[in-house]
Amino acid sequence: MIDFHCHLDLYPDPHKVADRVQHEGIGIVSVTTTPSAWPGTKALENGRPCVRTALGLHPELATARRAELDLFETYLADTAFVGEVGLDGAAAQSTRHDQLDVLEHVLTTCSQAGGKILSIHSRRAASPVLEALQRHPDSGVPILHWFSGSMSDLDQAIDLGCWFSVGPAMLAGAKGRALVSKMPRARMVLESDAPFARVKTDPIHPWDLESAAVTLAGIWDIPAQAARTQLEQNERELSSSVADVGSTDRRDLGAHPPSCTDSS
């Protein structure tokens, strides 16, 4: 099982968490919120082939960290994964221009690099995010993280070929389950959004994703094992696209999904 959106570096003890996911054979796409966090977060991969690092600049930090776009360009060749990037409509209105400028720069740079697998934030901003993806069709494979747009936004995202990462917190709400019921099963993967996401008062961890698979089985009205099989097939298909995007790192998750046993 692969967690396609986890803030591994923001745990109080990320090495402890990384050791556990490696021991349990759980793949993680470890997203970053700033380019300057890349070197330290990338180091969490050492000796842990289950962990892959995504290069990001979170929209809520667009104004404060847009000067790090040069760093983004510097590190981009070292990964097939980009995230967390996107737009946030809940953030201060004064940041909207910077957010869009940063996202446009990120998508343009990804297109020039041959495309990446992108984990995209779109809270209260689904429509402008989708418009940006339309302007940059060669930016890569977009995964809409914890998508919460309207049903018409969802239809547009499906038409654009977007993927969706869903987790226990999203599935705990009626709106999330309604959206998930309309998403293509073959374009859905799991995420934790740890260490921030919670169900009620309980924090979610990468090893809690089994509960999401069980919930999806109920939504899809199929046995739990059939849901797991579908998700594993999706993981393999999405991970295999690593070979088709620009990256100098050929050890990414697509090489060995989902057992993560290779230590090369």
Image (cartoon, rainbow, N blue to C red):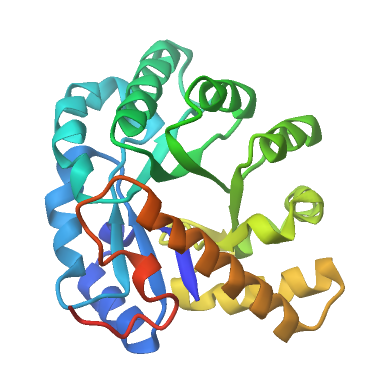
Foreground residue among 72 and 65: 72
Image quadrant in which the C terminus is located = bottom left
User: Does residue 202 appear anywhere in the picture?
Assistant: no
Residue shown at 41% from the left, 83% from the top: 259
For residue 106, side relative to residue 182 (left or right): left
Residue 100 found in image quarter: top left
Residue 44 found in image quarter: bottom left
For residue 170, side relative to residue 87 (left or right): right
Q: Is residue 176 above or below residue 194?
A: above
Residue shown at 54% from the left, 63% from the top: 237
The image position of residue 80, as x and y in percent, is 32, 51
Residue shown at 64% from the left, 34% from the top: 160
The image position of residue 116, as x and y in percent, is 38, 43
The image position of residue 36, as x and y in percent, is 15, 40
Q: Is residue 11 above or below residue 67?
A: below
Foreground residue among 9 and 136: 136
Q: Is residue 84 above or below residue 192?
A: above
User: Does residue 24 appear anywhere in the picture?
Assistant: yes
Foreground residue among 149 and 172: 149
